[in-house]
Amino acid sequence: MITAYRYGEPRCGGEFRIGVARHAPRGIRHEEYATKNYFDLWLRVLAPSLELLTQFRKGGITFQRFAARYRSEMSRPETRQVIDVVAMLPRHLPISIGCYCVRDNCCHRSILKGLLAFADSALPRTFNPGRRSNASPVCFAEEEKF
């Protein structure tokens, strides 16, 4: 299960907190992010681009348009890989994603929760260490030398 929170809110339990805001908190030392309830890990790559965020904050686009463009940004290969990894985490520990927004329903974290749930449903449920179909031919060549 993946929950959402606002930076600074008290923890609900032993969840691992992932910050997904564009900017890190100001005036707080890096060592204090977790103890002051901001995040345990900051994944800026899952935040909306600065351009998209600026357009939305200035009222240049609706939340629906913002959501569509954010989904598009999150469909890039680099971000898809991060989403896939984060989507697997709740299988092992409770996680919560957070940012500065007060309302979850007008925030990218509500969209991200959906993307993570979809990614989780598409990923295999079990790990098969004998499967080699994703390895590169170079890996196979090196493996055969030994």
Image: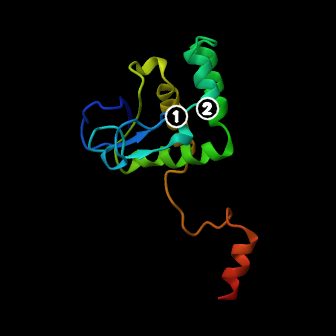
Q: In the image, what residue occupies the spot 75% across and 71% down?
A: 137
- The quadrant in which residue 100 appears is top left
Q: Give the residue pinned by disc 2.
A: 49
Q: CA distance from mark 1 to mark 2?
A: 7 Å
Q: Tell me the SS state at disc 2.
A: loop
Q: Tell me the SS state at disc 1.
A: loop
| 136 in relation to 53, above or below | below
Amino acid on which the number 2 mark rests in the picture: Ser
Q: Which mark is residue 81?
A: none
Quadrant assignment for the N terminus: top left
What colour scheme does the image use? rainbow
Residue 131 position within the rendered picture, expressed as x and y whole percent measured from the top left: 61, 66
Density class for disc 2 (Cα within 10 Å; few <14, some 14-19, many ≥20) is some
Q: Does the CB distance between marks 1 and 2 fall below 8 Å?
A: yes
Density class for disc 1 (Cα within 10 Å; few <14, some 14-19, many ≥20) is some
- The quadrant in which residue 130 appears is bottom right
Residue 93 position within the rendered picture, expressed as x and y whole percent measured from the top left: 35, 48
Q: In the image, what residue occupies the spot 49% across and 35% down?
A: 23
Q: Give the residue pinned by disc 1.
A: 22
Residue 29 position within the rendered picture, expressed as x and y whole percent measured from the top left: 34, 45
| Mark sitting earlier along the chain (1/2) | 1
Q: In the image, what residue occupies the spot 56% across and 41% down?
A: 45
| 60 in relation to 14, above or below | above
